[in-house]
Amino acid sequence: MSCMFLLLDTPSRRSGQYTMNHDHSKKTPDGASFDRSGSQDSLDELSMDDYWKELENIHETRGNNNEERVALVVREPDEGELEEEWLKEAGLSNLFGESSGDSLESVVFLSTLTRTQKAAVEKRVETVTQTMRKKNKQHQIPDVRDIFRLQDDSKGKVCDGSEPSTVGTSENKNETQEGAKGPKFSLGMDEQKSLLEDMPFSDTDINLEIPFAEQAANLKDSSVGKMCKGGGGDTLLPNFRLPKDKTGTTKIGDLAPQDMKKVYSLALIELTALYDILGTEFKQQKAVKIKTRDSGLFGVPLSVLLEQDQKKVPGTKIPLIFQKIEEATLETEGLLRIPGVATRIKSLCQELEAKFYEGTFNWENVKQHDAASLLKLFIRELPQPLLTVEYLKAFQDVQNLPTRKQQLQALNLLVLLLPEANRDTLKVLLEFLQRVIDHRDKNKMTLKNVAMVMAPNLFTFHGLGSKTIEQSEFVMAAGTANVMRFMIQYQKLLWTIPKFIVNQVRKQNTESQKKEKKDKAMKKLLKKMAYDREKHEKQEKTPNDADVPQGVIRVQAPHLSKVSMAIQLTEELKAGDIVARFLSQKSGNIQTLKKEDVFLYEIGGNIGERCLDDDTYMKDLYQLNPNAEWVIKSKQS
């Protein structure tokens, strides 16, 4: 079993090495082969100064810390174990082993995958199958071609329109036995390609309707794809934008937990499919658990921090110490770049550990450069990286993807894969970094400066067990600094759940409901429930509960003074308009609510629960989910 180590606080390198590498970068001529990705900016020699200096500062901080830390061992599984773990993470572990082929949930899940997503699953199942056979495991292992053929029992076509047996079969238009009457959740492959070819091509429009891997596959087969290249500089990053979606944009936090679980599985498969199409290896790592501190501030796992913080502030999602540190004044020149005095930082850490939770620590005496150094130290001292052991390499490998748009798409999927605590903390960090950049006229910290300084703090949580050669280290530095720039520049886009994934979740929910109804016992129970409900409604019906006419929805607002309202749908009616109608009722507890705290929710039908943005066109969404209930409430309720 091969291993690699994440060096936490073990000073295994000397600052002279970074100086040597820095000098080496200055000798590198323009156009060197370091820029492996056509999407990377050409980083001039001087622009790397901040990166190497930050590495030196990190080393000096570790060198001055006499507290011995344990190296975090990361298991690098063999290929079969790796793919088995991948299938488990994707929610498909029952494709192998004694229960293979028995899960109704997996059959439904597989029926909603696209062509490229199926190819990614098939590839991993093939590897697991071969590994199990080599190890002579006595498990029932289905032929990979049979996995997708399972869907034939109930439906002839999968949602992407291709034949269910293998990805190499001919593609058909999106048709299902019942799909003609109901809403379409995803396009067939012919329709996907047609839409891609017919749409005016724009390097800066991020298409969230068609799976990213399908877009990449189409670009490989056409002359439409343009490589989005350019030199360095803050102003040269493309102004990527999300075209308006009439059914509303879905952000992380807008969906119910049961739907987010499906989003995670689909994002993992889609990211893997995208990396497969683009020829980039995708491997997850697994950290061997080590003993960590179970209290305190620095070097404590995020989960432990949040557990102790929630005792003081119920519902908090970001460590309190992190929230406090990032409140630093933003106008100090060289903020983040100029380090605080090492001995003073160490003393502040000790004082914070002793006084923070008592509320006796005096923040007014903390110098701004020291506060910024504490923030970076907090990130570095986490027992596992903020971007997680599992996906740190995938974040790093974003630099290898061919176009900026594909790099942004990969980052979007990776953010969806982060644990909630890591994702929430990363979001607050990126927002803080953007605020620093917004004050660049006074603090002299541009996007490039901030990215160069922060990249080592997020991406150097690795050790490959061997000395890294200078050239590859330069490539890593330049690449991770560019990934850092992307994460800061496009952070608002990264927290969007792509529409094609939301549609796949809707499709899964719909297919699950259909299959449940086919179960005789369930049908009998539903029939009885429907009879009892109809009988109850006849006895207790009131004028307000009358059947809603065609083109009208009933909106409930149980926490407001006006608890129910019939709303006529029009082409231009938006979710924000409906909320405004309820908020115009000036009575009761409505006066205590703010407009920005109240939202319209889509509940049930083919979604668990979804918070709607104000610009959602209700008629379009109603056509997508006619069986939903519509409820106004705050996100806290």
Image (spheres, rainbow, N blue to C red):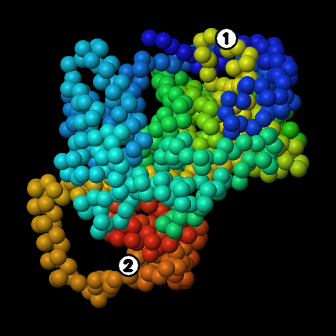
Residue that numbered label 1 is attached to: 467
Mark 2 vs mark 1, foreground winner is 1
- Which quarter of the figure has residue 33? top right
In the image, 5 versus 66, the foreground residue is: 5
Q: Which amino acid does label 1 sit on?
A: Lys
Disc 2 is placed on an element classified as strand
- x then y, percent, for residue 214: 48, 46
Q: Looking at the image, which residue sits at the far bottom?
A: 543
- x then y, percent, for residue 407: 61, 41
- The answer to whether residue 245 is seen in the rendering is yes
Q: Quadrant of the N terminus?
A: top left
Residue that numbered label 2 is attached to: 554
- Which quarter of the figure has residue 576? bottom right
Q: What residue type is labelled 2?
A: Arg
In the image, 343 versus 163, the foreground residue is: 163
Q: Residue at x 39, y 59 (%)?
A: 185
In the image, 64 versus 281, the foreground residue is: 281
- Which quarter of the figure has residue 264? top left
Q: Is residue 297 above or below residue 174?
A: above
Label drawn at residue 451: none
- x then y, percent, for residue 112: 34, 49
Disc 1 is placed on an element classified as loop
